Image: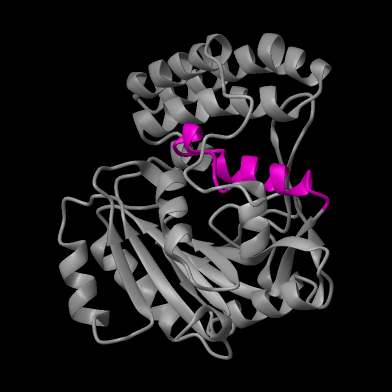
Amino acid sequence: MNRSELALSVVIPTFNRAPMVKRCVASVLASEGVDLECIVVDDHSPDDTGTVLHEAFGSDSRYRYIRQERNAFQAAARNAGARIARGSFLLFLDDDNTVAPDMCSRLVAALRAHPELGLAAPVSVHVLPDGRREVWTLGSDFDRLTSQPRDRAPRSREADIPQEELLPTTYSPNAFCVPRAVFARVGGFDESFVQIFEESDFGWRMLATGRKAAIVPAARTDHHGFLEPGCVPALRALGIEKTFRTFCFSRNRLWFVRRHFSFVGRLSVTFVFGPLSVLWYGFVALRARRPDIARAYARGFLRGVFSRLPLSPTSSVPHDA
């Protein structure tokens, strides 16, 4: 299978989630209507991820596996997968998803039909432990003064989603597809973010090239990792259920603002809404009896204020000439 014959490369980073990524890969390989390869980037998992996947998919020529030499987190893992990808389009998919059989073909079709798009994403549906289904977002953005996320119709019913129109967004968490040429032009994910906000940063840098981003309502993926066992719902909903993730979330929020917001926006977040978020997130963490999370958020904020984010993205993916 050469690149000219291959439409899509699906890149799935994973770490220590053998059963979950196995289910994800199975759903990708069951896709209909598109020639694809599925690349799993094992981010140096200590479990038996490689063995489990080889036993399940090793005989499928569309399945490819690479293992990172160290745990480098999502941005680096996605870039590693993109470097060996052969498809004309790249789909970045988190390992806690199962995709609808027609999701991949619908995303590719949307990008082909709308050349102004640089990013197309499916509707992500949270599958909660009690079986309820909850739409994540129908379009993501940030308030330019507060840096708070602004989601279009969060927690909508699936039946109420319009099917015919593309829904504008500025980025997409969890799953999104880009033309390979656009990914190269943007320069891949900024690995200095490590995890959290690297998707937002990529989306905003893509928009700066003059392309647009959209949710494709007819394309769907089920997101199963929203509330994993042991997670505190109030903390998981804020994205701060683990200490290092919390540190990155707080630091990267400031870095994202400094790179993309206006001077007024940077001032308001740094001196008003950023400190208020430290108090609020700290309060929520302490209520959940997680003082370590409160400390991690405060440390991340201070690092974001007093450390320097490179003016140009740090990436192992070469920029397109």
Residue found at x 51% / y 69%: 222
Find out whether residue 277 is within the magenta segment.
no
Residue 268 horizontal/vertical position (percent): 76, 15
Asked if residue 69 lies left or right of residue 144, the reply is left
Residue 13 horizontal/vertical position (percent): 39, 57
Asked if residue 142 lies left or right of residue 96, the reply is right
Does residue 317 show up?
Answer: yes
Colour scheme of the rendered structure: one colour
Total tally of numbered discs in the picture:
0
Does residue 224 show up?
Answer: no
Residue found at x 71% / y 43%: 204
- Residue in front for this viewpoint, 139 or 161: 139
Toward which corner of the image does residue 164 lie, by quadrant? bottom right
Toward which corner of the image does residue 202 lie, by quadrant? top right
Q: Please state the extent of the stretch shown in magenta in the rendering.
A: 188-210
Q: Is residue 96 above or below residue 73?
A: below
Residue found at x 70% / y 42%: 205
